[in-house]
Image (tube, rainbow, N blue to C red):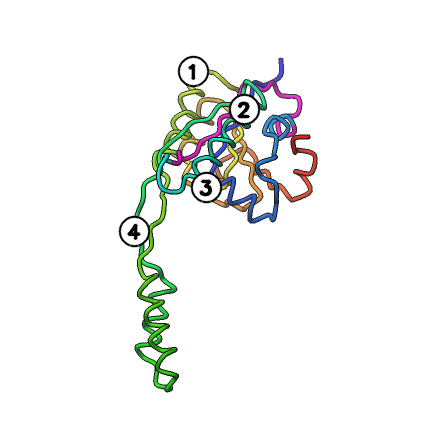
């Protein structure tokens, strides 16, 4: 019997890896095609997509885009499921704005006063910024990887991520006799040291993985 395989997708890490590769039409990627291409002769049990859920407030366009993406994802194949963590807003200091203000404070060359004051205002305006931070998503994926291994729900796992934080979960799954592969266009030395094989993908690999 062929190995039963499950694909675990770290949505945020995977998305940024694809963007870094220069791929476009990311919303048109077919994850059933991606899964089948990765698994080859193995038996496809499921593909699990993990990401932070956009709230129905603030940027409503982003909320609508995510809803449409999730709907298309699950319509692609019944074996594809979505697992949602949360997004929390954090206030962070902009390094670039801070360096600009420091540079202007120590400037010895005279520049136009209007330009100087405009630059100061710009630096202060952007010194603090609000960003969304994913919470619980990586933990959910890691826990599922291990629990499903303990329950013998797969023989091989494919983690679509280059995040080294999954290393302990990979070690635990492999200690239970499971094969674990990491897949990403990005390098991930720490994760690569723990999995059976780290599979690096290039741009051409995806050319036949779009929905028609």
The residue that disc 4 covers is 91
User: Is 51 part of what is drawn in magenta?
Assistant: yes
User: Is 76 part of what is drawn in magenta?
Assistant: no
Disc nearer the start of the sequence (3/2): 2
Between residue 90 and residue 168, name the one nearer to us.
90
Is label 2 or label 4 in front?
4
| Residue 179 seen in render | no
The residue that disc 3 covers is 163
Q: Which residues are magenta?
A: 37-54
Residue 82 is situated, as x and y percent measured from the top left of the image, at: 46, 26
Near mark 3 (Cα within 10 A), the count class, few <14, some 14-19 or many ≥20, is: many
- Residue at image location 66% in from the left, 33% down from the top: 209
Label ID, residue 151: 1
Q: Secondary structure at mark 4?
A: strand
Direction from residue 121 to residue 12 in the image, left or right: right
Label ID, residue 156: 2
Q: Name the image quarter holding the C terminus.
A: top right
Disc nearer the start of the sequence (4/3): 4
Name the quadrant containing residue 173. Answer: top left
CA separation in Å, label 3 and label 1: 24 Å
């Amino acid at each position: 019997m062929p190995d039963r395989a499950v694909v675990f997708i770290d949505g945020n890490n995977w998305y940024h890896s694809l963007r870094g590769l220069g791929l476009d039409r990311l919303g048109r990627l077919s994850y059933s095609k991606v899964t089948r291409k990765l698994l080859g002769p193995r038996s496809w049990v499921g593909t699990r997509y993990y990401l932070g859920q956009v709230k129905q407030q603030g940027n409503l366009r982003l909320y609508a885009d995510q809803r449409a993406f999730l709907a298309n994802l699950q319509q692609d194949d019944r074996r594809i499921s979505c697992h949602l963590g949360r997004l929390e807003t954090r206030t962070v200091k902009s390094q670039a704005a801070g360096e600009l203000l420091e540079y202007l404070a120590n400037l010895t060359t005279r520049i136009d006063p209007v330009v100087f004051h405009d630059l100061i205002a710009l630096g202060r305006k952007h010194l603090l910024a609000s960003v969304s931070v994913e919470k619980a998503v990586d933990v959910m994926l890691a826990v599922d990887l291990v629990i499903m291994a303990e329950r013998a729900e797969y023989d091989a796992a494919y983690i679509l991520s280059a995040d080294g934080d999954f290393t302990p979960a990979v070690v635990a799954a492999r200690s239970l006799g499971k094969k674990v592969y990491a897949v990403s266009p990005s390098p991930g030395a720490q994760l690569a040291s723990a999995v059976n094989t780290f599979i690096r993908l290039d741009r051409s690999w995806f050319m036949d993985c779009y929905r028609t």
